[in-house]
Image: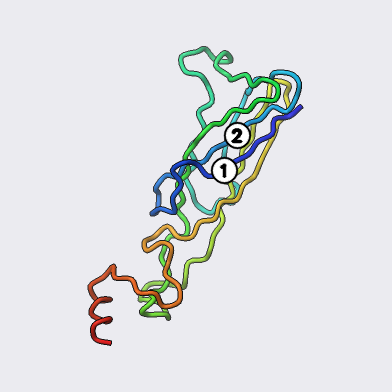
Amino acid sequence: MPFVLAMSRGFAWSDSANGRPNAVLLTVTNPGAVALTVTSLSVYEESKSGSRVDQPSYLRPNLPAGLGNPVIGPGLSETYPFEVAFTVPGYSGPSPQAPGGAQGVFGPPRDTTVTLRAQCQSSDGVVSTVAQPFPVLSTVAPFPVAQGGALQLASGFNLINLVTL
């Protein structure tokens, strides 16, 4: 019987700046009546829109090849954390004080979705997969981008504009 895989946001999730790591949890569940060994476990980005995906560490260290694989008992689950760093979209949206966009900005950031896919092979030769989309608002400060004319005082010029209005 194949493993059941699930991915979720991890314990240190943040909509952070470009390249900052976010934790993702990959849970492997054995729904069968026999203990199975995890022979292979990998995660990759399916959408190819831009991210760095670290692989989950599931092997026990300092053991020969083939002996460090985890065994998941019947009805039990194991969770393997890994990190992903998003690199899209790579620019911020228009300023609230300049709704048409600032010089060099080619439009507002689109709400992108990075889809991660995990594959796991068990000792009985069955491969299980799961795909999980993760929304990314923006990777360039300010994030999330202010909506509806909200004031952002990241620059002194914005404060001058507020005083002169």
Disc marking residue 16:
none
Location of the C terminus (image quadrant): bottom left
Residue 60 position (above or below residue 165): above
- Residue 8: x %, y % from top left: 57, 43
Q: Viewed as shown, does residue 143 lie left or right of 74?
A: left
Q: Residue furthest bottom?
A: 165
Residue 35 in which image quadrant: top right
Disc marking residue 27:
2
Instruction: Name the residue located 44 percent from the left edge and 50 percent from the top edge.
Output: 14
- Residue 86: x %, y % from top left: 46, 51
Location of the N terminus (image quadrant): top right
Residue 69 position (above or below residue 101): above
Secondary structure under badge 1?
A: strand
Instruction: Name the residue located 57 percent from the left edge and 36 percent from the top edge.
Output: 26
CA gap between label 1 and label 2 equals 8 Å
Look at the image and name its color scheme.
rainbow
Q: Considering only order in the chain, which callout, 2 or 1, is on the residue closer to the N terminus?
A: 1
Residue type for callout 2: Thr
Callout 1 touching callout 2 (CB < 8 Å): yes
- Residue 45: x %, y % from top left: 56, 45
Residue 72 in which image quadrant: top right
Secondary structure under badge 2?
A: strand
- Residue 61: x %, y % from top left: 47, 18
Which residue carries the number 1 mark?
8
Residue 148 position (above or below residue 20): below
- Label 2 crowd (10 A; few <14 / some 14-19 / many >=20): some
